[in-house]
Amino acid sequence: NAGVTQTPKFRVLKTGQSMTLLCAQDMNHEYMYWYRQDPGMGLRLIHYSVGEGTTAKGEVPDGYNVSRLKKQNFLLGLESAAPSQTSVYFCASSPILADTQYFGPGTRLTVL
Amino acid sequence: AQSVTQLDSQVPVFEEAPVELRCNYSSSVSVYLFWYVQYPNQGLQLLLKYLSGSTLVKGINGFEAEFNKSQTSFHLRKPSVHISDTAEYFCAVSDTGGFKTIFGAGTRLFVKA
């Protein structure tokens, strides 16, 4: 039981490049989330999903897109990366609405 | 709208001393409350949570927190800290019928020998 895994762990992009972050969970959780963590700002919700095939916007969705084609996977895409998207990105999943979230180890992204 | 305020950004403390990390929240609806811990270069993991029932909640590693509805607070305490407790601690709130959890900005606990 690996829990929540994230790929890649580190990435450096140039402005304007695109990339996809992959999150996978093996706990059969319905709910999945993408957050970004910036110093002094805690975690901010980017997008979330309440089940396979569904996605919704969080607090800071601009510049990001997501897809949840399979229950166990939640992808976060950056179509045209900007330096303001330099951050640490965390994926999380939860079995029950509003209850405990289980986090992945994070992806550290730098946009030059 | 909900919000979470962690009143201290950094808390330095000597080993074996007690510590309290403060958290206040605002919400117009019933809430669930959480404390998560993040060790360096890792994801967050649950320390403890309040869903209902007893207002004193015990968590892992000797931590506990008390839900105070009248003061809208959920302060985290430990009677005697260890070097290994050095980490960042996040308070979080979610409304009982909602999809989103709001996190505080975090408190960095630094335990000194």
Image (cartoon, coloured by chain):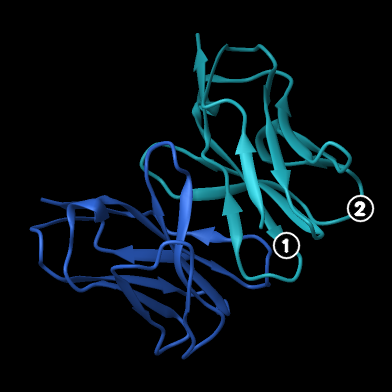
Chain colours: A blue, B cyan
- The residue nearer to you, when weighing B2 against B32, is B2
Residue at 71% x, 25% y is B78
Q: In this image, A9 relative to A41: left or right?
A: left
Residue indicated by mark 1:
B95
Measuring from the top left, give residue B41's x and y in whole percent.
Answer: 36, 42
Q: CA distance from mark 1 to mark 2?
A: 16 Å
Residue at 80% x, 60% y is B29
**Vertical arrangement, residue A71 with respect to residue B52, above or below:** below
- The residue nearer to you, when weighing B40 against A80, is A80
Q: Label 2 is found on which chain of the structure?
A: B
**In which quadrant will I find the N terminus of chain B?**
bottom right
Q: Quadrant of residue A89?
A: bottom left
The kind of residue on which mark 1 rests is Asp
Residue indicated by mark 2:
B53
Secondary-structure class at tag 1: strand
The kind of residue on which mark 2 rests is Gly
